[in-house]
Amino acid sequence: MVVETKGIVMESAPRELKAKVAVSGHSFEEFYGDNFNKLLKTAFFMTLSEEVAEDIVQESFAKAYLKWDKVEFPFSYVTKVVVNGCKSWHRHNKVERKNVEYALNGTSDFPDELFDILLSLSKKQRIAIVLRYYQGCSYDEISKLLMLRRSSLPSLISRALKVMKEKLQTNEEI
């Protein structure tokens, strides 16, 4: 079906595509509404850019939509696509942490101090911390998403937490 609005021709998706349901029983629209902001924040903490995070999450949902009727575990699938998108973005865009400007328009779930400490971690440590403690992912899920051995995650996360604790203590003394 083709719809013309203010001189712009848009193709409207047929009704049956709008109501696509995954193997798990989730409709795409419900899943999108329930998880977009959560995945956006995850992507933001991985890329440190609101615009890039939004692009990656939107592209991830678009990719998921195309395969939606075959997706068995929607959240895991889309999270993996988001993480891979962030990793790909980092590969193609060498980001200097010193020059990153960040703002969440007053909607941050983290105090500025904690956010600054997250920025000081390596990319891999930051992703692991965000997935473990913000998303609530298990070690198995994180190891699959980061393509690391599960046995290496506890030490990676432990080292990250140690750095965070030291920086928090240093900030308290100042």
Image: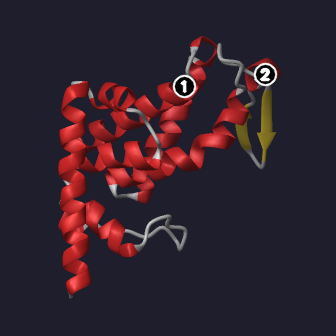
Q: Is residue 37 left or right of residue 47?
A: right
Image coordinates of residue 79 in percent, x first then y, are 46, 33
Q: Is residue 58 left or right of residue 99?
A: right
Q: Is residue 57 above or below residue 110?
A: above
In the displayed image of the protein, which residue is found farthest to the bottom? 174
Residue bearing the label numbered 1: 64
Image coordinates of residue 5 in percent, x first then y, are 79, 45
For marks 2 and 1, give the one nearer the viewer: 1
Q: Is residue 94 left or right of residue 103?
A: left
- Density class for disc 1 (Cα within 10 Å; few <14, some 14-19, many ≥20) is many
Quarter containing the N terminus: top right
Image coordinates of residue 165 in percent, x first then y, are 24, 64
Task: Identify the residue at image location x=44%, y=48%.
Answer: 42
Q: CA distance from mark 2 to mark 1?
A: 18 Å
Q: Which mark is residue 100?
A: none
Residue bearing the label numbered 2: 14
Type of amino acid at the residue the image marks with label 2? Pro
Type of amino acid at the residue the image marks with label 1? Ala
